[in-house]
Amino acid sequence: MDFSAFLDQLQQQLKLPLPGTAAHEDLRALAVGNNLPRFDHKVPPRPGSVLILLYNDGGRIKFPLIKRAEYLGAHSGQISLPGGKAEPGEDVFQTALRECEEEIGVPQTNVTILGTLSEFFVMPSNFMVTPVIAVTEKTAFHPDPREVVRVLSADILDILADETIKKKEIQAAGKYTLMAPHFEIEGEVVWGATAMMLNEFRYVLRKAMGGLSTGNQYPR
């Protein structure tokens, strides 16, 4: 299967029923002990989008992740997909494309949308996020230094294989200990909401690639 055929298969899979919560829960971090994080949101979740932006890098299928800058917020310093909150009047695609351009400098005109994954509620920050899947031929990234510390180039094999999912204790918000299933990509721990959304993408990728169980093969 060549890259174009792979994209066709992926697009078809995104039109079928998605695993949604079942895939998300496999990567949910669980509290260690009785010190549980509590979130008492007074308003409905805000809409947002993230972008899984595929590109062909010398025969390897990759997508960018970002390491966020340190700030006073729920996701300070974490590894995330490019994305953010919706502006008034935007749909999920417009939000994802705009945020990707603002954060890592990929022009919206260079991106082709393939579909979406399931909506995902990010509890700590009270966002209802739609992961958008897209493809680009342009792979030069220009991160916004105010928001992005570094851009990671994740290979789809970083999430496909069974053995890529690891577990470790993680300190969240400086006071909660969580046992977190995670992916390790370019020396960084990818956990929480990003890992949960990527796990649904992993399910869809396996279907698109012919039901692989180990993820140790590439479409050719």
Image (cartoon, rainbow, N blue to C red):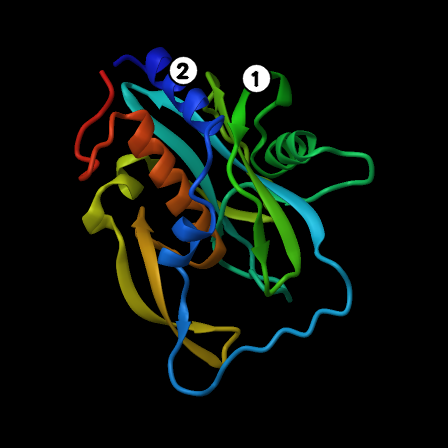
Q: Indicate the position of residue 161 as horizontal and vertical percent values.
A: 22, 42
Determine whether 64 is above or below 3 in the image. below
Q: Residue furthest front?
A: 17
**Residue 146, can we see it?**
no
In the picture, measured across the screen, residue 19 lies left or right of residue 72, that is left
Determine whether 8 is above or below 89 in the image. above
Earlier sequence position, callout 1 versus callout 2: 2
Q: CB under 8 Å between callouts 1 and 2?
A: no
Q: Give me the residue at 46% from left, 16% from top.
A: 137
Q: Residue furthest bottom?
A: 34
Of the residues shown, which amino acid type is indicated by label 2?
Asp
Q: Give me the residue at 62% from left, 35% from top.
A: 96
- Which image quarter holds the C terminus? top left
Q: Give me the residue at 57% from left, 45% from top.
A: 119
- For the residue pair 172 and 216, the one nearer the viewer reads as 216
SS at circle 1: helix
Mark 1, other Cα within 10 Å: few <14 / some 14–19 / many ≥20: few
Q: Indicate the position of residue 35 as horizontal and vertical percent values.
A: 47, 86
- Which image quarter holds the N terminus? top left
Mark 2, other Cα within 10 Å: few <14 / some 14–19 / many ≥20: few
- For the residue pair 100 and 19, the one nearer the viewer reads as 19
Q: Indicate the position of residue 89 as horizontal and vertical percent values.
A: 82, 35
- Displayed quadrant of residue 49: top right
SS at circle 2: helix
Nearest-to-viewer mark from 1 and 2: 2
Q: Which residue is mark 2?
A: 8
Q: How many marks?
A: 2
Q: Indicate the position of residue 20 as horizontal and vertical percent values.
A: 47, 46
- Per the rendering, the mark at residue 110 is 1
Real-space CA distance between mark 1 and mark 2, rounded to the nearest whole angstrom: 18 Å
Of the residues shown, which amino acid type is indicated by label 1?
Asn
- Displayed quadrant of residue 145: top right
